[in-house]
Image (cartoon, rainbow, N blue to C red):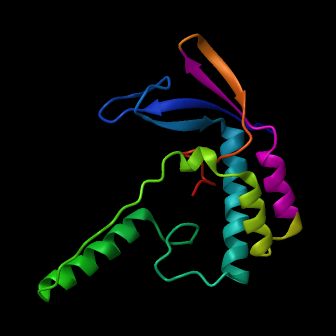
Amino acid sequence: MSRAGSVSQCVEGGEAGPAQEGGAPIVLLDEAGKLLERIIADRLVSHLCREGPDLDENQFGFRRGRSTIDAITRVRALAEETVSRGGVVLAVSLDISNVFNTLPWSCIREALNYHRVPPYLRRTIGAYLEERCVTYWGRDGAGRRVMSCGVPQGSVLGP
């Protein structure tokens, strides 16, 4: 099973390419890795839909039939309704630096236990996290790094 990815950099207004300062790194997985992630995500979402947790109505991540577009549409409708009644709308967006690549795997494991994810699925996710590596481009050419935390940005399993 492939757990290796290649890091590419998306630069605003530019093209994906080798990692550069100021861009957002994404991890490009091979087809087998993408397929495995989709299977894991589907089973995880199925469990959460059946067993809980009691997710807030305004949560859109890891919810079937909900997308980023749905979240934006809801915020826009709320803003339009508030402004039409003479109210004021203030939106705050938090951008946590390196949130994707610094998430401790122990936190992921604790959350899976807390939400009573079946043991077979916890083992599968644990095995998928172990010995992950990424290939990246630096000043000295291509490099390879074994990962010990984080979730690849661009991953189906990402937050």
Tell whether 66 sits left or right of 132.
Answer: left
Q: Residue at x 70, y 42 (%)?
A: 33
Q: Residue at x 39, y 70 (%)?
A: 70
Q: Residue at x 53, y 13 (%)?
A: 139
Q: Residue at x 49, y 83 (%)?
A: 57
Task: Please check the rendered image and state whether residue 66 is part of the magenta-colored stretch, yes or no.
Answer: no
Q: Position of residue 1 (x, y in %)?
A: 81, 39
Q: Position of residue 75 (x, y in %)?
A: 31, 74
Tell whether 2 sits left or right of 14.
Answer: right
Q: How many marks?
A: 0
Residue 71, image quadrant:
bottom left
Judging depth in this view, the residue of 111 and 120 nearest the camera is 111
Q: Position of residue 37 (x, y in %)?
A: 69, 51
The image shows residue 58, relative to residue 68, as above or below, that is below
The image shows residue 155, relative to residue 10, as above or below, that is below
Residue 63, image quadrant:
bottom right
Residue 32, image quadrant:
top right
Direction bottom: furthest residue: 85
Q: Position of residue 113 (x, y in %)?
A: 80, 70
Q: Which residues are magenta?
A: 120-138
The image shows residue 128, relative to residue 46, as above or below, that is above
The image shows residue 40, relative to residue 71, as above or below, that is above
Task: Please check the rendered image and state whether residue 125 is part of the magenta-colored stretch, yes or no.
Answer: yes
Quadrant position of the C terminus in the picture: bottom right
